[in-house]
Image: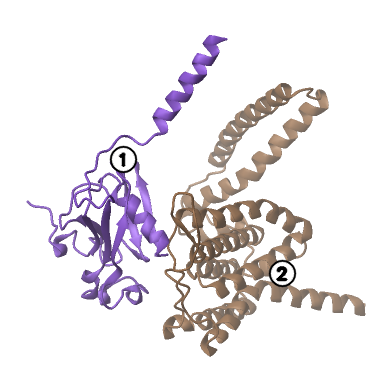
Chain colours: A purple, B brown
Amino acid sequence: MFKKIFCCILIVCLLCGCSGRPDVNVPDTNGDGKLTCTLEIRCDTLLEHLDEMSTGKAALVPADGQLLSETIVEFAAGDSVFDVFRRVLREEKIHFEYVDARVYGSVYIEGIGNLYEFDCGPQSGWMFSVNGIYPSLGCSVYKLADEDAIVFNYTCDLGDDLGAGYEE
Amino acid sequence: MKNESFSGFHPAVNLAFFAAVLGMTMFIMQPIYLSISLFSSCAYLLYLRGGRGMLRQIGYLLPILLLVAIINPLFNHEGMTILWYLPNDNPVTLEAIIYGLAASVMMAASIIWFNCCNEVFTSDKIIYLFGRVIPAMSLLISMTLRFVPRFKNFLQSVIRTQRAMRQPENVKEKLQQALSAFSATVSWAMEQSIISADSMKSRGYGIAGRTAYSIYRFEKRDGIITVILAILCLGALVPYFTGSMRWDYYPALTGNLVEPVQIFAYLCYSGVCLIPLIINLMEDHKWNSLRSKI
């Protein structure tokens, strides 16, 4: 009898331990008791290439190149860029599509607002920067810190036109 | 199969018709063209096979098509109109659903046209048309096409014989019987291929200077139908040259469907698709009216 109860308790403990969020310590830098970041989605590079885009896509590019203006978002410790991204875009009812690229251990954003990769040539697609730096990480792997500024940018040239090209 | 008059036309006319119809069905993804093609292919198959044959065809086609229509929005999330979200946060869009439907209609129409083609464009016509140009290939095609129903019939006769000797009692026995019938049929097929190879050799297959007998002659009515077919095809493709064929499913459904040019083209396209049916109905009418006078 005791053995059974003990086993049950052990199992419950194990389950709780597994499902609980791993202890992530993200320092609250400005000391307001909340973790916040900003999210912005832009496609300025497309404005210069409207005539090269796939059929029917040029009409989707906003005149100011801004799909989502800088939005302040609260997030929980341990959230990745993608967690914030999907939450905000669903709230704002902006279309997006991603694939879970298991090989790379991250998700890949294929399109935002019906603007897809390859819509402006074979080297086009979406990239994200945090605080102005383009990390060589997938957006569901990159963990956020307080006060981070996320920008999703469309590139027509593998990031060269964003100043994020790979160095030789 | 009843007396089918379109198959009485010259094989080249048959081929031209099916090539035109299949080509246009597969390459024009515009919804109205697709529906015209689907409806006329169904009507023709109904004429060729009757209600029961038609129902059987649809019975196994429908689930596949529904699957195609459902799968597309699950894996393709492009489109302006978001209907709801999948559990993994990817959107299900109206455009993806409609594109899936269009793709499945296209598939259905092509398969049904191929079925009609099987009834009309028989293997002797293949040999006749391509025997000179690609002799080995056309022989192979016609033998392969003939092989499938032959194999099926033989398999069924083996199974019937087995059943007559001993009714299987459980699933295991049934499976055993089916397997042994299959292996018997396969070895029969091997033997047959050797026999036909020997037979062909002894009759001098492949010797130079041989001619082939054919029962086909290109008559005046074949010429007339070919010209009509060509004109109607050109008429159906007019919007392509004037640029009003444009129809996009993504990112939003865009394009015109009822411009005057397009309506003209729809009529031409219906004409193309219904040629065999019209010929058949005319011949049937002629036949019936002549018969009643006697």
Mark 2: few/some/many CA within 10 Å (<14, 14-19, 20+): some
- State the residue in front, A4 or B211: A4
Count of numbered tags? 2
Q: Residue at x 37, y 50 (%)?
A: A99
Chain letter behind tag 2: B
* Secondary structure under the numbered disc 1 in the rendered image: helix
Mark 1: few/some/many CA within 10 Å (<14, 14-19, 20+): few
Residue extending farthest to the front is: A32
Residue under label 2: B5
Give, as a three-letter code, the residue at label 2: Ser
Quarter of the image where the N terminus of chain B is located: bottom right
Query: Quadrant of the rendered structure where residue B133 is?
Result: bottom left
Chain letter behind tag 1: A
Residue A103: give its label: 1
Give, as a three-letter code, the residue at label 1: Val
Where is B198 relative to B9, above or below?
above
Mark 1 or 2, closer to the camera: 1
